[in-house]
Amino acid sequence: MTENPTDHTEEITLGLHDATPPHLVDAMADNVVLELGWGRLLFGQTFADADELAEALRGETYGRRDICIYAREPHVLVSRAPAELFIDPSHTYRLRFSGEDEAAPATTGFTVRPLQSEAEADAMNNVYVRCGMVPAPTDVIWDNHLNLEPVDYLVAVRDDDGSVLGTVTGVDHKMLFNDPENGSSLWTLAVDPTTSLPGVGAALTRALAALYRDRGRAYMDLSVTHDNVAAIGLYEKLGFQRVPVMAVKRKNAINEPLFTHPPETVDDLNPYARIIADEAMRRGIWVEVLDAGAGEMRLSHGGRTVITRESLSEFTSAVAMSRCDDKRQTRRIVGEAGIIVPRGRLVTFDEEDHKFLAEVGDVVVKPTRGEQGKGITVGVDGPEDLDRALARAREQHPEVLIEQRARGDDLRLVVIDGKVVAAAIRRPAEIVGTGHHTIRELIEAQSRRREAATGGESRIPIDAVTEGTVAEAGWSFDDVLPEGERLRVRRTANLHQGGTIHDVTAEVHPELCRVAVKAAEAIGIPVTGIDLLVPDVTKDEYVFIEANERPGLANHEPQPTAAAFIDYLFPTTTGLPQPWKPDQAPDQG
């Protein structure tokens, strides 16, 4: 930062290790640039010269996203470097502070408060990555929090375990550069897409608005991508109105989807194929979409061509695929390799099935072939329930497997080329009561959130299994769940049926990783998702459940699953410089 902030010949840059200016004179400070770690905010109204502003934007460093907001003449600014700059296709919304504000509704299960620790700053980054946003160095966030008074970081934390669910960053324009309009702005609103608690984004927005209203600011602005219908709906509901303010950005790999058309039909790929396509394109690998609906692509680089269907490639043999597809065969193969499997039998649809249930007391029923959890019933412990579960499984495939139910969490380990690259606990769909919504309404709302967060891949079925799970807990769909009470509404943790996934890669016991690699080797499959039931991920106790020949790599971000997959397919591209993921979802604004 310059010694004299009133010297109009130099740029004021605020960020890491810079203190807030001791005072700002009546005239607005010039050339104000704010460092936020994921990139810089350039306040265009503080630049009198378009050439200087263009040059500042061109100074953006690799792997970051700078944003120029409030440029006096954005079209003139872009004309100074048309090959490098573009007008961002986002809308600016403004919440004007006037009169008495309505009291914010009470939150359920979480609290919004200022950032309190460096560990929470790191947790903020995890939320950014899960939302497809560019993270920031933790030390930049923490240093800004300690030393940069115009920047405010709020977090939403769970009341039960203190984990960070969401975050928002605010900038006080009056404190930063003596803004004559007395404004403020909201940036990087992000909510963990796996959370089951409603209203986090709205609560963070209201809390930041209340902060600036109490300081006497006139308004709070935010930028939102033009096609983000859900976010726009939220902001308009909270009272924001569109204003004619544009943002300008630099053409870089992160922003590329905003100023160019991607290869034909890449936008139509589901998240499990798209994450692979993005990783391939970042390395200069040519991507040709063969069937967007099936996630099938042809990847080419340096004379090598590989066809993939999501994480399934032509390097997975038909034999390995058939072994994964037939759960009975999978059990036999891994069991012979010394891996622990639950007691089980192929269903004969007679008294022998009921005898097995009587022996073990509690079973899981599933078709021998199938995916996405279809036809599976967990927690069958009575004769009538068994008959219904067998009929349900038989609808998916004529051969049905019955296994003794093992207790514990559903652990998915992704194995690529003989290494575990990600581990995650998968939990069944659950809802949290508000005290005034019915269980059916809560399920439908949670299902909509899961569907939006996964590009339509995850939703909670309103079916007999869900109804039975709710009834087993002593409720009905029409009951109102008390505020804060948690209720699991599915027995299986399958993501396609509304389940959530929680990364435990850093915690998983080495023996569980060894088991996963051993199972993959026994099956003879190079890329797989191995499912275990474990009482504790930090210990070595487990029971093998099944292997998936096409694991969803997008479910394990921020672990580098797509990078490991492309490393396996195209080893010569390993180690190439890679910017952060192109922003196909939320904007930093």
Image (tube, rainbow, N blue to C red):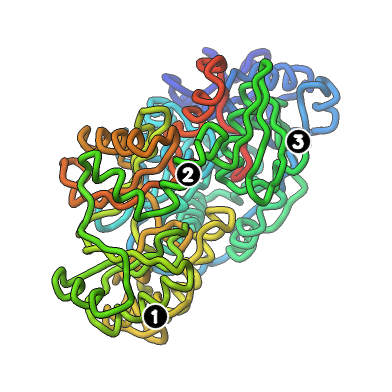
Q: In the displayed structure, would residue 158 be above or below residue 53?
A: below
Task: List the residue tagged with mark 2.
Answer: 321
In three-dimensional space, the C-alpha distance between marks 2 and 3, rounded to whole angstroms, equals 30 Å
Task: List the residue tagged with mark 3.
Answer: 263
Residue 277, horizontal then vertical, whole percent: 62, 35
Give the left or right position of residue 405, taking residue 148 as reference.
left
Residue visible at 85% across and 25% down? 79
Estimate how packed mark 2 is, as few (under 14), some (14 to 19) or many (20 or more) residues with alpha carbons within 10 Å: some
Closer to us: 415 or 425: 415
Disc 3 marks a residue whose amino acid type is Pro
Residue visible at 48% across and 76% down? 462
Q: Quadrant of the C terminus?
A: top right
Give the left or right position of residue 336, taking residue 31 as reference.
left
Q: Indicate the quadrant where residue 494 lies.
A: bottom left
Q: Indicate the quadrant where residue 85 lies.
A: top right
Q: In the displayed structure, would residue 92 be above or below residue 522?
A: below
Q: Earlier in the sequence, mark 3 or mark 1?
A: 3
Front of the two marks 2 and 1: 2
Q: Are marks 3 and 1 in contact (CB under 8 Å)?
A: no
Residue 200, horizontal then vertical, whole percent: 45, 58
Task: List the residue tagged with mark 1.
Answer: 467
Estimate how packed mark 3 is, as few (under 14), some (14 to 19) or many (20 or more) residues with alpha carbons within 10 Å: few
In three-dimensional space, the C-alpha distance between marks 3 and 1, rounded to whole angstroms, equals 43 Å
Estimate how packed mark 1 is, as few (under 14), some (14 to 19) or many (20 or more) residues with alpha carbons within 10 Å: some
